[in-house]
Image (cartoon, coloured by chain):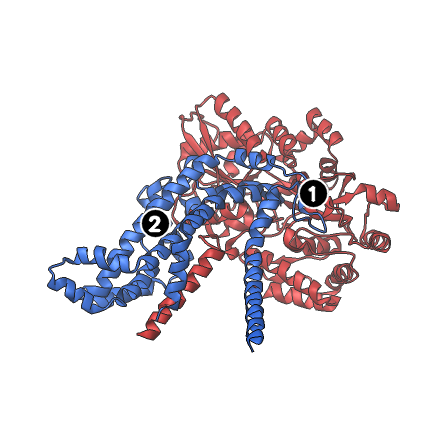
Amino acid sequence: MKLKKFGAGVLAMAMAASMMVGCGETAPATTEAPAETPATEAPATTEATTEAAATEEAPAAEAKSIEATEITFWHAMNGNLETVLTQITDEFNANNEYGIKVTLVNQGAYGDLQTKLQASAAADALPDLAQAYNNWLTPYIDKVVKLDDFVATDFDNWDDIVSAYRDECSEFGFIHAVPYNKSTYVLFYNKTMFDELGIEVPQTWADVEAAAKTVMDSKNIAFIGYDDLAGAVEASLHQNGSDYVDATGALFNDEKGLETCEYLSNLYNNGYARLVGEDGYFSNVLSNQMIASYIGSSAGVSYIKAEGWDLGVAPIPGNVAKAANMAGTNIVMFSQDSNKQLAAWEYLKYITSTDAVVEWAVGTGYLPIRTSAYETDAYKAYMDENVCAKACYEQSKDFFFSPTFDASNDIRSTVPSTVEQLVYDKADAQKWLDTIVEAINAQY
Amino acid sequence: MNNKRNIGNIIGTVLKFAVLILGSVFTILPFVWMISSSLKTPSELVAIPPALFPETPQWVNYKEAWAAAPFARYFVNTLIVTLCTTCGVLVTTVLSAFAFSRLNFPGKKTVFSLFLATLMIPGEMLIITNYETIIKLKWIDSYKAMIVPWISSAFYIYLLTRFFMQVPESLYLAAKVDKCSDFKYMIKIMVPMNKSAIFSIAILNIISSWNAFLWPLLVTNSQEMRVLSNGLVRFQTEAGSSTELIMAASCMLVMPIIIIYLFLRKYIIEGVTRSGLKG
């Protein structure tokens, strides 16, 4: 009896303690999406292959009589991004001739949206439209509406969409999405510090090493950091002419892979590069002038507070080739009702029209998804004012996206912690290569 | 001799206070840090070396955080959900704990084992099935969806059953001799005797309900139905977060919990410590 009582007491205390510390139902860390999922290089087939998607396609343009209906659109746009999205959506709701009303539903951050989509797919309660990364979709790709017919019959020039985005949106063998809030990784740097030390913006790995040495010698701080370590490994491999992963495993266990690891490990072991630590993003570290530059998403530019120094933004350095991660979600359609599909398509056409794209890009800092949008006076004027937009545009020809397959999500969450451990251990290049390859292959 | 004892006493007291002060500093520091961060500018936040207090308090952070989402509405929702789930939990827990500890009915042990067995299922696994149920019931975007699944807890029932079992059987029998009904016995004897345990359960439930994030996010869609914790993600995007605003919003979020604690701390401390030291 005593034991029982004591047991109950201990349990009560343990529970009290655990609840006080980290209470509530938070999403399990494993299901959380990586902050930014740059996406692929996989073969892009624009033609529809029928076996992959089970969803019926609605007849598009011929008989266009759409009944007034309500469309729900789940998104993860917060703050100013949500304001601009709401504004564009309100314009559509007020002006469309069919009485279509699009309701925006904010589902928190990307991780929350991903969790909710997955749960809703299991419960057959998906919304009509939702933002999504390709690697979220694999478990329920059969519920995604194929958009090939819509694009073929009722879309103003699919070829006007930036080609890397088109490839990404047809990764599964059919058009499963339209690109929307796209960003890319760029090099943010302290221009004042660069000028003071006479450093040119680095174009190549060798430039990075030389500039890093100068900064280390005179300021004793790191030169570069990466917000996304998995993205850094992937981009560096591409920059060295190597492949990263595919559905069978790691593809860089060779000389080029070793060279890449040598570059990265030397950066860290010499103190030229550093980890971000608890802050999570280098925007704070750069703001505070504790680092000379970092590579991160162009969408993060508003978090850099350049007080007492000038911010510079440049395309990310390459080696034998240039390669830049792209990031940001696309919009997928889930509605099964043909009238709703038509209505949702009207909305998608509207928000991806050149004018709306420019409004979105200028309002949020995301990249235009249409080449014609880059040509507009409004966007040109924006680029003249905005160094970040300019750098993104310069490297738009070098975009690549990460392929999606069963293990891709696990790889994305494994690589960063693996690299961090290697940095802590001050491991050499061979150890880097072996450990990363092993960590990746263990995910299959 | 006397002197020695005095010195010993003084050293003992000093040590005791030193440990207590150290402990309280460790406990309070995160709160102080949260409050001071909520009043800093973004660049002060990341300054090295960090300053404990901001140069000029940025009260505007609170204004900005408050304006970023309908926090007043979230607050009301959180309050409704927390109160209802806690009342629900107390009713179900007290009733079933009483049944399991005092009443005899066929299959009691089996039912109790089944209750315990549910503790072995991780909550994450239940989320999806519960969500499906809520959708089938068409409860999405309602208070029902946020409250009903959480008005009973096998763990609390188990816990309180253990407490109830410690009340001597003779009390029950004596009450029976005096023609006291089971319900009256429960209300008049069992509940007052286990006040502190019941309070602990209420407090723990209030805390977990107040901080619940994933479930309310899943079962609600409109801004009118969201709760406070959902509002916090407003300040995070894929590429960065406005820490000073998150901290300001967090301060607003935990303030009610701290106030509740200040009012009820006697019971909370009693509930947690006394029950732990019993036996």
Give the red chain's letter: A
For the residue pair A116 and A345, the one nearer the viewer reads as A116
Q: In the picture provided, is B109 more to the left or to the right than A248?
A: left
Q: Return the x and y of residue B57 as percentages of the image width and height.
A: 63, 39
Q: Earlier in the sequence, mark 2 or mark 1?
A: 1
Q: Which residue is mark 2?
A: B86
Asked if A349 appears above or below A324 in the picture, the reply is above
**What's the amino acid at mark 2?**
Thr
Asked if A206 appears above or below B139 in the picture, the reply is below
Badges 2 and 1, same chain: yes
Q: Which residue is mark 1?
A: B43
Q: CA distance from mark 2 to mark 1?
A: 41 Å
Q: Quadrant of residue A306?
A: top right
Residue at image position (86%, 55%) is: A217
Chain under callout 1: B
**What's the amino acid at mark 1?**
Ser
Asked if A18 appears above or below A186 in the picture, the reply is below
Q: Quadrant of residue A424?
A: bottom right
Residue at image position (50%, 49%) is: A137
Tag 2 near tag 1, CB within 8 Å = no
Rendered-image quadrant of the C terminus of chain A: bottom right
Q: Return the x and y of residue A140 as percentages of the image width and height.
A: 46, 50
For the residue pair B235 and A70, the one nearer the viewer reads as B235
Mark 1 residue element: helix
